[in-house]
Structure formats: C-alpha cells, structure tokens
Amino acid sequence: MNQNFAAIILGGTGQVGGAAVAELLAIPECRVVVMITRKPIAARSRVRNVVLDTGAADFAERTAALACEVLSQGPVSAVSCVGVGFWIDALERGRIETT
C-alpha cells in the first residue's frame, strides 16, 4: 500500500469494531479513522469522532454527507461493524458513488 487513505467506521466502539480501528491505526498509510458513534469517545491520535443519532430520520443523509466530505480529501475505505443497510440505501439513492 503506497497511497494514503481514510477509513470511516461504524461500530468502532464494540469488540470487533475496536479491533478494526486498532488494525487501521496500525497501517501507516491510513491518515485518519473517522468513527461515527452515538456518544463522544476519548480523543485519540488520527481518530476523528463524529457523534450522530443512529435513530434519526436523517442519519443516512448525514452519514453520506460525511462520507462525501472525507472522500473529497482523498481515498476512503468504509467499514461497518454493525450493518450496512444505510450504505446500501445511500448508494441506491445516488448519495454515494463508488469507484
């Protein structure tokens, strides 16, 4: 891997998600891990915490907007450790494009 990338992760505070975050942070090319959580987490180097209400009607839209913002800064990997329904919905509605 020779290109810097960012990762967006949901479920990063659970056991599996926490392991995924640790693995991502161990990759020098990973410039930032954007964690979408329901509650604030302790500050960590190279981690950006975005607190969103996962039950809100606009959750998919806000998450898609965040993904577009992060994508505008370079390559992004999206990781979900809780489910991918909102990603599928966003893709189907044309809010996120894949390459």
Image (cartoon, rainbow, N blue to C red):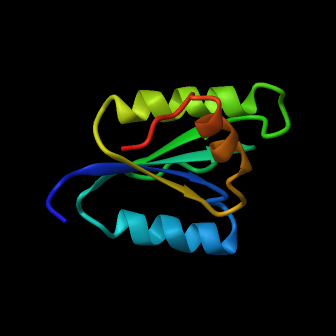
**Vertical order, 18 against 65 (above or below):** below
The residue most toward the left is: 2
Query: Where is residue 25 shown, x and y percent of the image?
Result: 38, 63
The C terminus sits in image quarter = top left
Image point 46% across, 35% down: which residue? 97
The N terminus sits in image quarter = bottom left
Q: Is residue 96 left or right of residue 17?
A: left
Image point 71% across, 35% down: which residue? 52
**Vertical order, 80 against 66 (above or below):** below
**Vertical order, 66 against 8 (above or below):** above
Query: Where is residue 66 shown, x and y percent of the image?
Result: 53, 31
Image point 55% across, 26% down: which residue? 65
Looking at the picture, tell me which residue is in the foreground, 51 or 77. 77
Image point 83% across, 30% down: which residue? 56
Residue 36: quadrant of the picture: top right
Looking at the picture, tell me which residue is in the foreground, 44 or 58. 58
**Vertical order, 14 against 75 (above or below):** below
Q: Is residue 93 at all visible to an observer of this figure? A: yes
Looking at the picture, tell me which residue is in the foreground, 90 or 15. 90
Q: Is residue 40 at all visible to an observer of this figure? A: no
Q: How many marks?
A: 0
Query: Where is residue 51 shown, x and y percent of the image?
Result: 67, 36
Residue 86: quadrant of the picture: top right
